[in-house]
């Protein structure tokens, strides 16, 4: 596809930076000189990027580069503005990883706690820096797809791995830019319309009668690009009542004009799965069906030094839950959530040293349910079962206005902003969330950064209203609030990228499901205070530049996170908040075996804080600690002439382990895949 660049001078191509999505030229959005390349790269680029090429630091001539490029797939402005570490998982890393779903990929590549209930992406909870699964904001191409019913559904996404261009992960509070929800972090999943015409088919088969088929196509029509993908997957399950079926469809289209770029997305996913012990081990034969629909449109318009970006989206989620799979009428929940949202961003470029951002955002959330909400005035029937009356309802609207300014002072960058939020559930309050990020380039290889950000999260509809034989919600819950501090350093040279980040978060009114004894119901309350202290260490070694004249070792990654949480003195049993990963260690190694055959190893260690109530034969055996464990994954792949053959072993040494109490994770799982891509000129 032809790209329109807003420059008057002839485009200059630099070795190893041409057409690179993570290039500093795109992320800065301003005129830079190549002499400042190293400093700018340290401020914005990701030290964990497993495959990004090294910058050519031998260039000595100065060239003026483009100021704003609305036609390229640059890093979203919301991410490129931030001086903290943004973990980027790119397309090549996605292809090499021994994973089957988005949640597994995030865990694999970013040292994040992903607690899986169902395999192959059926249901997983994301925890960043010890936060709960409700505290991570999920974005799809910059638009909020977080589920207001429960964070359990945040990754009900209508996309497959082959459609993803990259994933960007911001750790720590980010409310001034993203609004409520970016409490412990934000994850942006980026797709893009095709820039070439192709068709690709893939089939994957494995143990437990696993089968997965995928077909995708990209094509160009004049100044428009299109991506279409469809996939289905199924398995009998690795233990009783862990079977699943999943289907999804996704479309992304782009139209490029001289001064504008239009993006349109639409997708749907339909999944059904056995939910063995998902929400209570007292009734292990649970079952769930989920349907998710998403559509969105965004426009980028460049006029002079101003970039205007209006966006709108709609998301619907239908959830059917059975406590007894073999006896549906005994107890069932039916929920339908509708979310409409839109925002308008203005980015103004002040010469070469500053950018001002102003934005407005609105989001309306509704739930129709037979369990969650208050008595409904207008009754409707469930979209998935027209015999079930949804007689409960709750709706709320969130309004946010925010402004920020990014300023460069030679080696120093300051990025500060403030968010004003009003929610109709809290009629008498306007929440104010300021934040500031600072980065200082000590030299061409070494940089320091620090940040202070305030954040908030509204209770989910499940927090407020859920009732069951074992649970009781609380309609009087207050929003969670926190103040987060980051302090860190980055280092980069020709063969090493590394970062160390210390963080401290002071949380108040923290929401959790608790009980006093194992005989009580779980109920939601606001903790008065919960403080989180931790450190993150990341490093990536590029062996191709470290060791010359060798073609065996490609790269290695090491990541370690330590977390310690302290709450108010309490004898209450916590179901979520205090069951965090105290220690997590990851090591990845990518190396060549022979010719076009490449191996990718991943070793992980997890040591989880907290306890769970252990059940045997549906009977409680009391509280027990989580055991630490090691796992090893391996993927071997061969590529040539559009063909791709892969062999994968998850949990290679068949280690018994738990992410959630009473839900054993799969043992060794062997898979084989075959794919073919045909490109058209």
Image (spheres, helix red, strand yellow):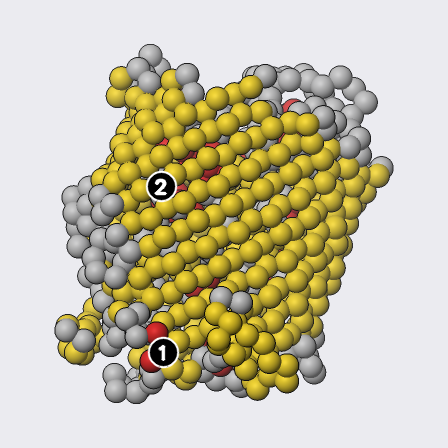
Residue 557 % position (x, y): 35, 37
- The image quarter in which residue 454 lies: bottom right
Q: Residue 217, position in %: x, y?
A: 53, 31
State if disc 1 and disc 2 touch (CB < 8 Å).
Answer: no
Task: Identify the residue at image location x=67%, y=60%.
Answer: 341
In the depicted structure, whether residue 445 falls above or below residue 560: above
Q: Which of the two residues, 223 or 228, is positioned nearer the viewer here?
A: 228
- Does residue 441 appear in this view? no
| Marked residue nearer the N-terminal end (2 or 1) | 2
Residue 612's spot in the image, x, y percent?
25, 72
664 left or right of 179 in image: left
Q: Which residue is mark 1?
A: 329
Residue lying furthest front: 387
- Point 53% across, 67% down: residue: 383
Q: Residues within 10 Å of mark 1 (few under 14, many from 20)?
A: few
If the image is split into quadrants, where does the C terminus sit?
Answer: top right
Q: Foreground residue, 394 or 523?
A: 394
Q: Establish if 79 lies above or below 617.
A: above
Q: Residue placed at 48% from the left, 22% from the top?
A: 678
Q: Residues within 10 Å of mark 2 (few under 14, many from 20)?
A: many
Quarter of the image where the N terminus is located:
top right
The residue positioned farthest toward the right in the image shown: 304
Q: CA distance from mark 2 to mark 1?
A: 32 Å
Find residue 473 and report its image quarter. Answer: bottom left
Q: Which residue is mark 2?
A: 212
Image vertical order of residue 402 relative to residue 52, above or below: below
Horizontal side of residue 211 vs 200, given as left or right: left
In this rendering, would 493 be left or right of 251? left
Query: Is residue 272 visible in this depiction of the protein?
Result: yes
Query: Of helix, strand and loop, which one carries label 2?
Result: strand
Name the residue: 66% across, 62% down. Answer: 340
Q: Nearer the viewer, mark 2 or mark 1?
A: 1
């Amino acid at each position: 596809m032809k790209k329109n660049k807003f420059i008057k001078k002839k485009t200059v191509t630099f070795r190893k930076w041409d057409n690179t999505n993570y290039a500093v030229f795109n992320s800065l959005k301003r005129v830079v000189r190549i002499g400042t390349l190293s400093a700018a790269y340290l401020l914005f680029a990701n030290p964990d990027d497993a495959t990004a090429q090294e910058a050519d630091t031998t260039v000595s001539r100065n060239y003026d580069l483009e100021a704003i490029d609305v036609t390229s797939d640059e890093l979203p402005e919301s991410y490129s503005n931030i001086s903290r570490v943004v973990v980027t998982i790119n397309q090549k890393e996605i292809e090499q990883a021994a994973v089957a779903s988005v949640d597994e990929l995030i865990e694999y590549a970013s040292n994040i706690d992903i607690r899986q209930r169902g395999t192959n992406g059926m249901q997983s909870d994301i925890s960043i820096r010890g936060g709960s699964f409700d505290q991570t904001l999920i974005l799809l191409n910059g638009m909020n797809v977080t589920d207001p019913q429960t964070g359990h559904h945040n990754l009900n996404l209508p996309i497959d791995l082959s459609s993803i261009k990259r994933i960007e992960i911001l750790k720590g509070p980010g409310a001034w830019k993203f609004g409520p929800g970016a409490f412990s972090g934000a994850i942006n999943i980026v797709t893009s319309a095709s820039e070439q015409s192709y068709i690709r088919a893939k089939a994957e088969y494995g143990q437990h009668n696993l089968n997965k088929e995928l077909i995708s196509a990209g094509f160009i029509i004049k100044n428009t690009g299109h991506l279409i993908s469809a996939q289905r997957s199924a398995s009998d399950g690795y233990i009783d009542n862990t079977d699943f079926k999943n289907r999804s469809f996704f479309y992304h289209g782009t139209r490029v004009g001289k001064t504008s770029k239009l993006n349109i997305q639409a997708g749907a996913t339909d999944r059904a799965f056995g939910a063995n012990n998902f929400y209570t081990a007292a009734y292990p034969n649970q079952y769930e069906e989920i349907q998710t629909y998403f559509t969105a449109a965004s426009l980028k318009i460049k006029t002079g030094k101003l970039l205007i970006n209006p966006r709108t989206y709609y998301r619907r989620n239908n959830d059917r839950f059975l406590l007894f799979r073999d006896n549906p009428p005994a107890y069932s929940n039916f929920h339908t959530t509708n979310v409409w949202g839109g925002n308008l961003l203005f980015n103004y470029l002040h010469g070469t040293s500053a950018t001002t951002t102003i934005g407005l955002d609105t989001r309306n959330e509704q739930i129709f349910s037979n369990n969650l909400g208050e008595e409904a005035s207008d009754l409707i029937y469930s979209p998935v079962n027209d015999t079930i009356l949804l007689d409960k309802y709750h709706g709320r609207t969130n309004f946010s206005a925010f402004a920020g300014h990014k300023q460069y002072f030679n080696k120093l960058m300051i990025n500060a902003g403030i968010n004003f939020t009003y929610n109709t559930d809290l009629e008498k309050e306007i929440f104010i969330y300021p934040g500031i990020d600072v980065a200082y380039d000590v030299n061409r290889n070494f940089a320091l950064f620090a940040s202070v950000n305030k954040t908030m999260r509204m209770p989910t509809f499940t927090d407020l209203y859920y009732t069951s034989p074992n649970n009781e919600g609380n309609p009087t819950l207050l929003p969670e609030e926190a103040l987060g501090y980051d302090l860190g350093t980055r280092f980069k040279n020709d063969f090493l990228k590394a970062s160390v980040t210390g963080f401290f978060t002071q949380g108040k009114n923290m929401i959790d499901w608790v009980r006093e004894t194992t005989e009580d119901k779980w109920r939601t309350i606001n903790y008065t205070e919960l403080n989180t202290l931790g450190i993150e260490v990341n490093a990536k070694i590029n062996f191709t530049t470290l060791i010359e004249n060798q073609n065996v070792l490609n790269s290695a990654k090491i990541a370690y996170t330590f977390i310690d949480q302290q709450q108010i003195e309490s004898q209450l049993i916590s179901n979520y908040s205090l069951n965090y990963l105290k220690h997590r260690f990851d090591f990845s190694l990518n190396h060549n075996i022979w010719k076009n055959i490449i191996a990718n190893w991943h070793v992980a260690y997890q040591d989880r804080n907290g306890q769970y109530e252990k059940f045997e034969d549906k009977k409680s055996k009391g509280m027990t600690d989580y055991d630490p464990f090691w796992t090893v994954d391996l993927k071997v792949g061969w590529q040539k002439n559009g063909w791709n053959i892969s062999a994968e072993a998850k949990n290679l040494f068949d280690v018994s382990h738990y992410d959630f109490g009473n839900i054993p994770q799969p043992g060794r799982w062997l898979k084989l895949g075959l794919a073919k891509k045909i490109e058209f000129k």
